[in-house]
Image (spheres, helix red, strand yellow):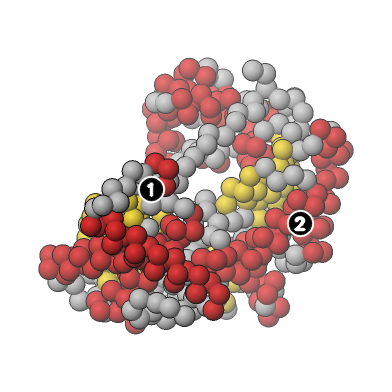
Amino acid sequence: MKPGAALSWLFLDLNSYFASVEQQINPALRGKPVVVVPMMTDYTCAIAASYEAKAYGIKTGTGIAEAKKLCPRLHCVLARHDQYVRYHHRIVDEFVRHTPLNKVWSIDEMSSRLPTGKRTLQAATDLAHALREGIWENVGHYINGSIGIAPNSFLAKVATDMKKPNGLVILQHEDMHERLFTLDLIDLPGINTRMLERLRQAGITSVEKLWHISPKHARMIWGSVNGERFWYNLHGYDVPDQPTNPGMIGHSRILDPELRPVDKARQVARRLTLKAATRLRRMGFYATRCHLSVRLADGPRWSGEMQLHPAQDNFTFVHSLDAMWDIMRTEERPVKIKKISVTLHGLRKPEDITLDFFHTETIQGKRQQSLSLLMDDINEKYGAETLRLGISPRTQAGYLGTKIAFSRVPDLAEFAE
C-alpha cells in the first residue's frame, strides 16, 4: 500500500447547519444571533448556533439561560428536524450535479471520491467553487459550507475544520504533514478526551509526535487494529471504510414540561414504541428484545428489557412496553418523567429466522403483523394519525420521536409515522 499523491477526495461540511436553514427559511433571522432549541424553555440547551451567536461565545450545548445572558437579543427557534432533512436532500441533489456522492456521513457532512479528471489542483479547486456557488444558487444563499480536498476522506474532513465558515482547504501530499502539525491532537476526528489521555500516557502530545510513530505502535496505543487504520489515514493512505450493520432501532424524547406527568409520559412512550415498530417493518427487520429507559424528573434512571419471539408487529412491542412500564411504576413510583427511550434490539432479517408456524404465539403474531402492515398502508395513504393505538400526544414541535442523530439522517417518511 502506498499513500495517495493525488487529490482524490472532497469533503463538504455545512456550517451551523440547523441555524443556517432557519435563517434561509425566515429572512427576519438573517444576520441575527440564532440558536436552535429542542423546546421553548430556558432550562434546555442550544443544539445549534448561528455564527452571529457564536461571536458571543454561544455554542452547541450552551444552556439557554446562560446564552441569553451572553446575548440579550438572542433569537431562540424551535428545532424543525423535518425541514433540516428536506434541505439535506436538496443539498445532496446539488452535490451530485457536480461530483459523485461516495458517502453521507451525517445530516451536514458528505464526501466524494473525485473522478480521475478532477484530481489536479486546478480542477479540484474549480469543482469546489462550482459546488459552493451551486448550493447558494439552487438551495439558498444562507446555506454555507467548508470544503476540504485531500488524498483520502479522513484528511479531507480534517481540512474542512481548518477554515470556517466557507473555507476551502486543500491538503497536498507533499506538504500536508507540515500543515497537520499546526493542529492539536483533539482536532483530529476519532481522538476524544479519553483517547487524548491514552496518547499522553504513551508520550504522544502533538500531531507531529503521532505522525512519527509506527503503525504497530499506534495499534498498541489504541488497543486494536483501529490504531493502525488511524495511522494510515493520517499519512494519506486511502483506507476503505469498514461495513456496518444496524444493531438497533429506537426513538428517545426529552419531554415537554406538560407531558412529564406519568400518565401523559406513558402516552409518549407508546407513541415512540409504535414509531420504532413502523420503522422496523419499513427496514425489513424483526426484533428479539425491547428495551425501555426512563430518566425521572428528580434525577434517577430506570431501565428494563424484555426478550421476545422475533416480532415486527405493533401489539407485541406495546404489550412489552406496558409490562415494563408497570414494573417501573412499582419500583420507582415516579411523579414526573423527564426523558424516555424505547429501543428494539436483536435485529434479524426474515431469512435468518426459523419460525414454528404451529406455535400459538407465532400464529397470533402473524395476525398482529398483518394488522400492523394494514395500519402502515392506511396511514401512509391518508396520514400518520388515521389509524392509531391509543392517544397520540402533541408536542411543541408538532411531531414526536423523530430527530436527527449524529450519524443518521432520518427518512422523511419517519416524520409522518
Q: Nearer the viewer, residue 264 or 258?
A: 264
In the image, what residue occupies the spot 47% across and 53% down? Answer: 284
For label 2, the crowd category at 10 Å Cα-Cα, with few meaning under 14, some 14 to 19 and many 20 or more, is: some
Viewer can see residue 188? yes
Left/right placement of residue 33 relative to residue 130 reads left
Crowd band around label 1 with a 10 angstrom C-alpha radius: few (<14), some (14–19), many (20+): many
Image position, residue 268 (x, y; %): 34, 73
Residue 396 placement, left or right of 357: right
Front residue (pair 186, 7)? 7
Callout 1: helix, strand or loop? loop
Image spot of residue 175 (x, y percent)? 73, 27
**Identity of the amino acid at label 1?**
Leu
Question: Dot 1 corresponds to which residue?
Answer: 347
Q: Which mark is drawn over residue 47?
A: none
Whole-percent x, y for residue 192 in the image:
45, 41
Hey, what amino acid is under mark 2? Answer: Glu
- Residue 250: quadrant of the picture: bottom left
Residue denoted by label 2: 94
Work out whether residue 55 or residue 217 is closer to the camera in this orientation and state it: 217
Distance from label 2 to label 1 (Cα)?
34 Å
Name the N-terminal-most of marks 2 and 1: 2
- The spot of residue 386 in percent (x, y) is 47, 80
Q: Residue at x 58, y 25 (%)?
A: 232
Q: At x 45% / y 70%, what residue is drawn?
A: 374
Q: Is the residue 398 above or below the residue 12 in the image?
A: below
Say which of marks 2 and 1 sits in front: 1
From the viewer's perspective, tell me whether residue 161 is left or right of residue 409.
Answer: right
Camera-nearest residue between 86 and 281: 281
